[in-house]
Image (cartoon, rainbow, N blue to C red):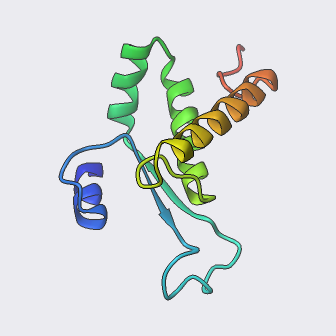
Amino acid sequence: MIHRLNRDYLGKDRPTNVISFSLQEGEDSDFTPHALGDVVISADTAAQEAEAGGWTGYQRLIFLLLHGILHLTGYDHERSGEEEAQRMERKEQELWELLEKEGLASLPVR
């Protein structure tokens, strides 16, 4: 499904791990002034990336959600050059560390 979304809406004919759809852009942006948009995550891709990267599946999903939300708030790593990509990466790291500190980057042990 995410491959189709990536192709149909972003013109990229390949699967991806996360796509963000802003509700703050375009002609209907005033329709939902308090909603940032939607984040679509490929659970299959996230699981593969988690295994390859030594993450838990939950950690990878949380990180991809964080990544998608940053896109919705204006961060970009694909079209705005290396400096902006590094700025986004620093913000991801800062927020990830905060999530870890607050115990929100892993599932609670019961």
7 vs 66, left or right, is: left
Q: Quadrant of residue 59?
A: top right
Q: Is residue 28 above or below residue 110?
A: below
Specify the farthest residue to the left. Answer: 13
- Residue 11 figure quarter: bottom left
Residue extending farthest right: 102
- Total number of numbered labels? 0
Q: Name above or below for residue 39 compared with residue 105.
A: below
Residue plotted at (56% across, 37% down)? 86
Q: Residue at x 43, y 20 (%)?
A: 50
Which quarter of the image is occupied by the C terminus? top right
Residue 57 falls left or right of residue 12: right
Relative image position of residue 69 (x, y in whole percent): 59, 51
Residue 42: image x %, image y %? Answer: 37, 41
* x, y percent for residue 5: 29, 59
Query: Compared with residue 71, is residue 28 higher up or lower down, i.e. above or below?
Result: below
75 vs 48, nearest the viewer: 75
